[in-house]
Image (spheres, rainbow, N blue to C red):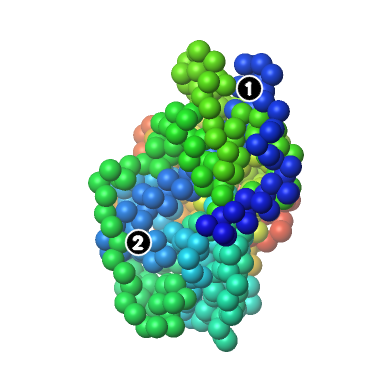
Amino acid sequence: MKRVIAMLMTIVLLTGVCACAEPATSADEAWALVRQAYIYGFPLMLMDATLTVGTNVETPENGKAPVNQVGHARSLATAAFRQVVTPNVDTLYSQIFYDLSEDALVIQKPAVDRYLTFQVMDAWSDTVAVLGTGADTQDANTYLLTGPGFDGEVPEGMTRVEIPTDIGWIIGRTLCYGPEDLENIYDVQAQMDVRTLRLWESGEAQPAGVYDPDKDGTPIQIVLGMGPKAFFDRMNELMLQNPAYPEDAELLNAIAAVGVGPGLSFDPAVLGEDAAERWKAMLTGMTAELTESAGRFQVKNGAFRFLGDPISRFGQEYDYRALVAIGGFGANPVDVAVYMKAGFDDAGDALSGENSYILHFEPDALPPVEENGFWSIIAYGDDDFLIDNPLDRYAINDRSDYELNEDGSLDILLQAEAPEEHANNWLPTGSAGFHLFMRVYLPQETVQDGTWRAPALTKQ
C-alpha cells in the first residue's frame, strides 16, 4: 500500500493532477477529453487484456503460460491457421507476460547459431529493449528485469533491464529454417529459463497457474467491447502501478477533468444522456481517424509501404500508438524489423490472383540486412490469412532454393498456377485478391529510411 501511495504522489507531482481538477465545461468538451483519454489508454488496456488471456492456463501450453513463465509455439503457421492474422512463417514465437510488482524476473537466453531476440515491451506497448540484436547475439546471457519498485541487488553475472511499469509482454522470435528444423528449435526453447528472482535463487519449482474459463477470449474484442465505466475504472486502476511517462503530464492534467487518471474516479454522468450512442459512434470511426492521423509516419518505397519511426518507441504520438495497438500489437522498432506491405502493383492496380506478376530484384539488390538478419516475402489473401496451395509454400525468403537470372537479378513469380519454368521461384497467390508482406529483420539503415529501392512489382 505504501508503494502505491508513493507512486500516486509521484504522478501527482509530475502532472499537477489533483482531486480538484477543473471539470469539463460542456458535453462536447467532455467527449473530446474522453476520446483523448481512450486513445491514450487503449494500449495499456489491451496489454492488460492480452496478459489476462495469455496467462489463463495452469501450465505452459499452446504458446500460453502462467504469469512470469514462458510459453512456446511448437509449429509453423499454415493455411489452416486462423488464430492471428498475417502470421509469419519465419520464426517460432516464445512469449512471457510479466508482473514485476512483487519480484524481479530472470530471463536466460541460450547461445544459438541463428536469429533469436526477446522484444521487451512495457505496459504502454513501448519497446524498452530488444535482447539479442547486438554483438552478443549468439552468446548465452542472463538478464534481470526490474520494475519501478525494485530496490534489491542485481546478482553477479546478470544484466539489468529496468522497466518503468509493473506489467508487460516479452516476445521471443527464433528463426526457423523450415519444418525439418523444428526439433532444433525445440532444443533452443528448452534452454530458455524464465522465473522470478526468488525462485531462481531458491531453486523451487514454478507454481501452477489458475485457469478461469470466464477469462478466455480475444483481447482486442474484450477491450473494444467495454463500456466507458468499465474501461476507465480499469484504466485508472492500472495507472497506479504502471505510471505514465513524465512527458505525458500535460495530457494527464487535461483528462483528469473527466475523472481519468491514476486513482481517480470516472463518473459516466459526464457523458450526458446519449452516452451509449456517442460511445459506439466514437469507436466505429476511430480506426479510420487514427489511420489518417498516422499517415505521416508511413514510408513509401515503390509498391511497398511500411509504418516507420517512432513505431514501438512512440513518445507522445498517442494516435500512432493506438493505431499500432489495434492493427499490429507487438510490432518491432524499425531497427529490428520492417514490415513492408504491397496491395497494388507498380501501375496502381489491386493485386489479384486472376493475374500473374513478377517481383523483380535488381542484381545485388536483395534486402540488405545486418549480421544474423534475414528477409522473407509472404502472400496473404484478402482475409489476411495464408493462401492454401498444393506445395504448402507460403514464402520465398533468403533461405529458399530460388534461381537467380544470368545477370544476378531475382524474379519471384506471383501467380495461382505453377509456372512451366523456375518452379522454385513460384509464390502461390490463389485465384482471388491478395497482398504481400516483405519482412526484413535487422534491416540496414537504407531499408529503414526508404533509400534502398524495393523490387518492382509488375503485371504480366
Q: Which residue is mark 2?
A: 66
Q: Is residue 68 visible?
A: yes
Q: Residue at x 68, y 53 (%)?
A: 10
How many marks the image carries: the answer is 2
- SS for dot 1: helix
Task: Using the image, determine if residue 148 lies above or below residue 428.
Answer: below
- In the rendered image, residue 358, in percent from the top left (x then y), is placed at 52, 44
Q: Residue at x 34, y 80 (%)?
A: 204
Q: Nearer the viewer, residue 85 or 303?
A: 85
Task: Using the image, determine if residue 61 lies above or below residue 151.
Answer: above
Q: Mark 1 or mark 2: which comes first in sequence? A: 1
- SS for dot 2: loop
Residue 72, by quadrant, is bottom left
- Asked if the residue at tag 2 contacts the one at tag 1, i.e. Cβ–Cβ closer than 8 Å, the answer is no
Q: Amino acid at mark 1?
A: Ala
3 relative to 175 in the view: left or right:
right
Residue 290, by quadrant, is top right
Q: Which residue is mark 1?
A: 30
Q: Residue furthest top?
A: 273
- In the rendered image, residue 457, in percent from the top left (x then y), is placed at 57, 41
Q: Nearer the viewer, residue 457 or 53?
A: 53
Task: Using the image, determine if residue 268 lies above or below residue 68.
Answer: above
Q: Amino acid at mark 2?
A: Pro
- In the rendered image, residue 173, in percent from the top left (x then y), is placed at 47, 63
How many neighbours does mark 1 have within 10 angstroms: few (below 14), some (14-19), or many (20 or more)? some
